[in-house]
Amino acid sequence: MICEAMEDFATALPRDRALAGLDLGTKTIGVAVSDRRLSVATPLETIKRTKFTADANALLAICAKREIGGLVLGLPRNMDGTEGPRCQSTRAFARNLERLTDLPITYWDERLSTVAAERALLEADTTRKRRSEVIDHVAAGYILQGALDRIGHMRRAP
């Protein structure tokens, strides 16, 4: 089930299950996971993309192993908020994935997530080689943390 609104996604989530955040690139998929209380996102790994079926199987294996309750896909909007070809590709990935899993899926605006991840890695004095290895799943962590913060705010609101 794809939930366009974060409120619908939050309602669809099973209790005490972690979430996974995805940074979908053309060559890789960065994966981050949350804790079961939905408070902290942790970068996990980067999947090298091949074909959709193999990518989906790798992703769903992570979801099964980690008992994931929902997926947050980074939506790469343009800086003016419009959606271009990369957004269309992300939405197509979500529609194809929806056919393979009952997990609720939503989107999170990922503008500048990679920039934030790069900045954090530079501040941590990470080597260029290491940055290239981890940038995608660190960016997925930023995407997921944004969604977790929004869900937490919604749940605390009267």
Image (cartoon, rainbow, N blue to C red):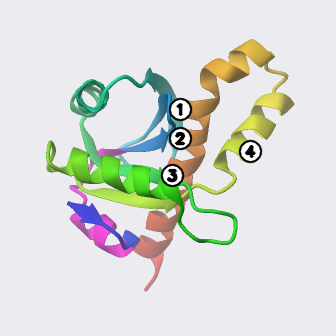
Mark 1 vs mark 4: which is more N-terminal?
Answer: 1
- The segment highlighted magenta reads 7-19
Please say whether residue 97 is one of the residues in the magenta stretch. Answer: no
* Alpha carbon distance from label 1 to label 3: 22 Å
* SS class, disc 3: helix
Assess whether mark 2 and mark 1 are in contact (beta carbons under 8 angstroms): yes
Q: To which residue does mark 2 refer?
A: 140
- Tell me the quadrant of the picture where the C terminus can be found: bottom left
Residue 139 in which image quadrant: top right
Mark 3 vs mark 4: which is more N-terminal?
Answer: 3
Residue 86's tag is 3
Q: To which residue does mark 1 refer?
A: 43
Residue 38 visible, this orientation: no
**Residue drawn at (53%, 41%), measured in percent from left and top?**
140
Above-or-below relation of 98 to 158: above
* Residue 73 picture location, percent across and down: 42, 50
Q: To which residue does mark 4 refer?
A: 115
**Residue drawn at (49%, 28%), measured in percent from left and top?**
28
Mark 3 vs mark 2: which is more N-terminal?
Answer: 3
Foreground tag (3 vs 4): 3
* Alpha carbon distance from label 1 to label 2: 7 Å
| Mark 3 residue type | Arg
* SS class, disc 2: helix
* Residue 47 picture location, percent across and down: 43, 24
| Mark 4 residue type | Val
